[in-house]
């Protein structure tokens, strides 16, 4: 068994920043990640970091833009924290040597981005995430922080108290991908989940294969509600064949979108009469798909993004990486021809419910980054606001977990913050299927699943960790010993297809219900899942099988939340409900696992900031 | 229906000529098989024949290294990584390789493809001349299983050059850096730690302690950054001038040839050698 003060799960931007912050507070911190840190998907972020650094810009402006972008579903304390602390954190990255692009006067370069009223997206070419990730890992190396790389965390060690708010997280269980050894990691202070997005729920995504939402799925099953899961961002410019991201920076620098009839549809189609291509991502993604669905796309599949008029020199200076991506992954040289683009799943606005200090409702359990929902982004994230979220809230979670005195958070978490329960008519019952015979749920149930049947409640630190280790060993044995059944790849691909078909940019009740039926089918199939590879050495078959369970739970949470929200807000468009309904729907969707019988309730949106109140206005770009 | 060919082979002592002949005959057989199949199914999708290295010390049948053959659909745009994923998901879930981002930035899937180090995700099947496409783990590294190699030594070398910024920084203000200086270090900052260069380097193969191209490039990235001062640069040069440092490089350019991010690694190593000479001349 390993033991540290703070265990950080995941080693992308948020996890690395959290680890450095905890280390600076004097904590003994360890990073546990299924990938070596530099393989994390933060490295694929391209555009930049929104930070108020220049005369003429202001915190208030950044906060207003973010609140408007969120379609008034972001929480003011989270947004104001982000806007206030992003400049300091961005300069901190510079002090750690990050290779930002530079202006002629030697200062860090900034550029316009969608939905921003000032060009405040601070960038390093079109590979800002790559530079951020490597700079942060360098700081981890410098400090000698312990890294368990290629260790896959598959269970949280959480006590058995009946109410989630009374539970404590005392560590995690992981297995060493290289040897198959299952081991426990005890956390004296706390566990920080920083596992990234759940993009693999979809089949056309900019996300890495590793982005399977392990953190949200584990936290959900341990009793933490998932917040606003229906809000999935579809990025307007991804390559049609692979889903590889083409940065919004292309449009920020002046790139133009054309349909097959040669029209600059963002203006000519009336989608965003003022700012055209620089509207918010949800607006541009819907515009593109409308053009394609109405027969004005190329090959009924994509539109053109043209940046040739910017000239080779400017493109090479600011967007060089885009030339390589378009050439290598789509076979189009963007200096000679327009790029092909279409919307693709990119980001989850929702996630593990946390406060501004990264706390969940379970004691000692934190979350930061894309896996968390604080909520800065509400129903739609602005480009350039994800990277500052990683560093600002990663650092805050790290400090809090290390024991630093911090102001009590304004955002309350857990069922206590409920403002009423939700109601949703589902065609099949969601949640767990209990067919266990030998005490090991076939789908590898979580601690909570056993709570009711386990006799005496487990509440002590050591016994909680040991019990979790026993359970996880039993689950893995079960998966490895079973020698026939269904393979994860079949379940996963059907799930991804259904989600892409039914829970995409445009949604309707029938499609969402079909998705729930398909998810149920996946869950039933999963009861019979088996791992074909008998080896303990680097068994990716086993890892993908466990990940697939997580994808099923998250797909269900996304779809249930989407079906329940009967309005159109931000990234969530409903055929039957074409208006934003402020009277009934300025509230956060909360979905609690509730020992396998998902429970829907709502929490308040905080529109009152430190010095002002944000009045919901109609959103035009 | 499985279209996986059942043929396996063990690496033998065949001459290059024999190997070429074998490849040729296999390719012919493959084309024949493909034609037959396409006729019978009306399937026009082009397919590719992969020969993939297999090894697992733990599993009886894979203890002896071998090559497995897979025949997978390869429409235009298919990468080697796509083909491997297809083979794994459709035919053999035990086929093991590292991969994550699919867009040449995570650096997980450096492989030995048709005899050269490349990223699987960045290599289009249609750009490869040789059939079948041979996919092997990176040479000069210990194979853990199938296409997965032990990267620990590579990481150790990277970390041996103190790969982190060591400048004195002001309290709140950003430091200034000229566009020229940022341009100077730009290529070196692109490294994704894939290990292709290290694997291609004959010197690194013979001298396990040689820092290697990636680590020297990492040191270059900081040594050339004007935000670090001369004392730190001197310290960095001391690390690079050690017995297993820059002087080991024999400018064979193999690292530069294989780098998937087009970093001029050999040039950077040469520049560090020149810096070292300049530095030493000061004491004369």
Image (spheres, helix red, strand yellow):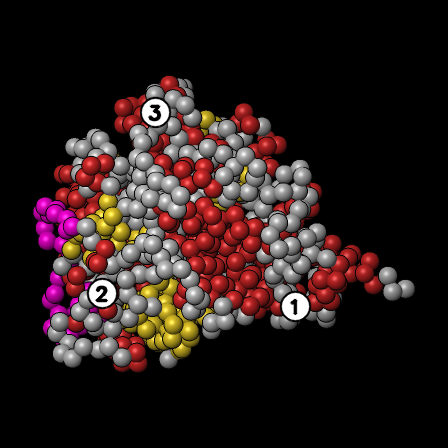
Q: Which mark is residue A196?
A: none
Q: Quadrant of the C terminus of chain B?
A: bottom right
Q: Quadrant of residue B34?
A: top left
> Judging from the image, what secondary structure is the residue with disc 3 in?
loop
The residue that label 2 is drawn on is A164
Residue drawn at (63%, 42%) of the image:
A107
Q: Which residues are magenta?
A: A420-449
Chain for mark 1?
A: B
Specify whether A422 is left or right of A301: left
Give me the C-alpha separation between circle 3 and circle 1: 58 Å
Asked if marks 2 and 3 fall on the same chain, the answer is yes
Give the image location of residue B117, x and y in percent. Answer: 54, 55
Chain for mark 3?
A: A
Chain for mark 2?
A: A
> Judging from the image, what secondary structure is the residue with disc 2 in?
helix
Specify whether B59 is left or right of A311: left
Residue drawn at (43%, 65%) of the image:
A405
Labels 3, 1: front one: 3
The residue that label 3 is drawn on is A271
Give the image location of residue A550, x and y in percent. Answer: 26, 58
Specify whether A24 is left or right of B5: right
Q: Is residue B49 above or below residue A433?
A: above
Q: Residues within 10 Å of mark 2 (few under 14, many from 20)?
A: many
Q: Residue furthest right?
A: B284
Q: Is residue A436 magenta?
A: yes
Labels 2, 1: front one: 2
Q: Is residue A263 magenta?
A: no
Specify whether A64 is left or right of A565: right
Q: Which mark is residue B210?
A: 1
- Out of A192 and B272, give the one closest to the viewer: A192
Q: Is residue B69 visible?
A: no
């Amino acid at each position: 068994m390993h033991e540290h003060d703070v265990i950080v799960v995941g080693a992308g931007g948020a996890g690395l920043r959290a680890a450095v912050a905890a280390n600076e507070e004097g904590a003994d911190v360890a990073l546990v990640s299924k990938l070596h840190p530099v393989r994390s998907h933060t490295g694929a972020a391209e555009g930049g970091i929104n930070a108020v650094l220049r005369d003429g810009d202001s915190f208030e402006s950044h906060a207003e833009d973010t609140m408007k972008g969120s379609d008034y579903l972001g929480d003011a304390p989270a947004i104001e924290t982000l806007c206030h602390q992003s400049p300091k954190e961005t300069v901190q990255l510079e002090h750690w040597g990050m290779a930002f692009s530079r202006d002629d006067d030697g200062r860090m370069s900034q550029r316009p981005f969608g939905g921003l009223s000032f060009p405040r997206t601070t960038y390093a070419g079109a590979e800002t995430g790559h530079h951020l990730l490597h700079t942060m890992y360098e700081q981890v190396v410098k400090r000698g922080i312990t890294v368990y790389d290629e260790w896959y965390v598959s269970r949280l060690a959480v006590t058995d108290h009946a109410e989630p708010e009374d539970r404590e997280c005392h560590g995690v269980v992981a297995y060493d991908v290289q040897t198959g050894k299952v081991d426990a990691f005890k956390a004296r202070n706390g566990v920080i989940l920083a596992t990234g997005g759940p993009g693999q729920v979809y089949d056309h995504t900019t996300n890495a294969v590793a982005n399977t939402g392990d953190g949200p799925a584990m936290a959900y099953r341990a009793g933490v509600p998932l917040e606003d899961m229906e809000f999935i961002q579809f990025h307007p410019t991804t390559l049609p064949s692979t889903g590889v991201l083409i940065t919004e920076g292309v449009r920020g620098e002046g790139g133009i979108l054309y349909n097959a009839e040669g029209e600059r549809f963002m203006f000519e189609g009336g989608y965003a009469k003022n700012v055209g291509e620089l509207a918010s991502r949800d607006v541009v993604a819907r515009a593109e798909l409308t053009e394609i669905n109405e027969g004005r796309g190329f090959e009924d599949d994509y539109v053109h993004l043209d940046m040739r008029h910017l000239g080779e020199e400017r493109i090479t200076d600011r967007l060089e990486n885009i030339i390589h991506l378009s050439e290598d992954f789509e076979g189009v040289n963007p200096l000679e021809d327009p790029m092909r683009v279409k919307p693709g799943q990119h980001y989850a606005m929702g996630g593990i419910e946390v406060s501004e200090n990264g706390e969940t409702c379970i004691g000692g359990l934190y979350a930061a980054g894309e896996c968390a929902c604080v909520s800065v982004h509400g129903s739609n994230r602005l480009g350039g606001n994800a990277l500052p979220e990683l560093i600002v809230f990663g650092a805050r979670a790290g400090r809090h977990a290390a024991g630093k005195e911090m102001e009590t958070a304004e955002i309350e978490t857990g069922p206590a913050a409920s403002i009423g329960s939700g109601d949703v008519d589902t065609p099949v019952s969601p949640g767990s299927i209990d067919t266990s015979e030998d005490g090991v749920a076939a789908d590898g149930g979580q601690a909570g699943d056993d709570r009711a049947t386990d006799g005496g409640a487990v509440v002590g630190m050591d016994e909680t960790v040991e019990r979790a280790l026993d359970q996880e060993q039993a689950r893995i044995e079960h998966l490895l010993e079973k020698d026939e059944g269904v393979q994860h790849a079949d379940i996963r691909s059907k799930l991804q297809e259904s989600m892409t078909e039914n829970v995409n940019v445009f949604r309707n009740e029938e499609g969402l219900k079909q998705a729930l039926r398909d998810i149920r089918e996946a869950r039933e199939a999963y009861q019979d899942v088996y791992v074909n590879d008998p080896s303990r050495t680097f068994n990716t078959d086993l890892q993908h099988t466990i990940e697939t369970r997580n994808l099923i739970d998250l797909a269900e949470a996304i779809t249930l939340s989407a079906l329940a929200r009967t309005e159109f807000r931000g990234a969530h468009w409903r055929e039957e409900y074409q208006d934003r309904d402020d009277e009934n729907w300025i509230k956060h969707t909360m979905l609690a696992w509730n020992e396998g019988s998902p429970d829907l309730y709502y929490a308040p949106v905080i529109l009152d900031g430190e010095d002002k109140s944000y009045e919901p206005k109609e959103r035009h770009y | 229906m499985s279209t996986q060919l059942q043929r396996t082979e063990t690496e033998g002592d065949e001459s290059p000529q024999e190997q070429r002949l074998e490849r040729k005959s296999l390719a012919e057989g493959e084309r024949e098989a493909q034609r037959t199949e396409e006729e019978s199914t009306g399937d026009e999708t082009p397919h590719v024949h992969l020969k993939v290295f297999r090894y697992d010390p733990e599993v009886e049948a894979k203890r002896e290294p071998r090559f497995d053959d897979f025949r997978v659909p390869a429409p235009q745009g298919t990468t080697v990584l796509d083909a491997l994923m297809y083979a794994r998901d459709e035919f053999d879930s035990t086929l093991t390789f590292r991969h994550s981002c699919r867009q040449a930035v995570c650096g997980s899937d450096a492989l030995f493809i048709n005899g050269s180090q490349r990223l699987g995700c960045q290599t289009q099947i249609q750009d490869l001349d040789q059939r079948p496409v041979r996919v092997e783990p990176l040479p000069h590294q210990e194979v853990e299983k199938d296409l997965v190699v032990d990267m620990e030594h590579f990481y150790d070398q990277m970390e041996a050059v103190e790969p982190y910024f060591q400048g004195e920084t002001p309290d709140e203000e950003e430091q200034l850096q000229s566009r020229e200086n940022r341009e100077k270090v730009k290529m070196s900052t692109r490294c994704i730690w894939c290990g292709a260069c290290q694997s291609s380097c004959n010197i690194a193969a013979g001298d396990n302690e040689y820092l290697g191209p990636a680590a020297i490039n990492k040191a270059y990235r900081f040594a050339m950054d004007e935000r670090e001062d001369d004392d730190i640069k001197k310290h960095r040069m001391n690390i690079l001038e050690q017995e297993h440092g820059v002087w080991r490089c024999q400018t064979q350019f193999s690292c530069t040839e294989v780098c998937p991010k087009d970093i001029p690694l050999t040039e950077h190593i040469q520049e560090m050698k020149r810096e070292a000479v300049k530095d030493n001349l000061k004491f004369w």
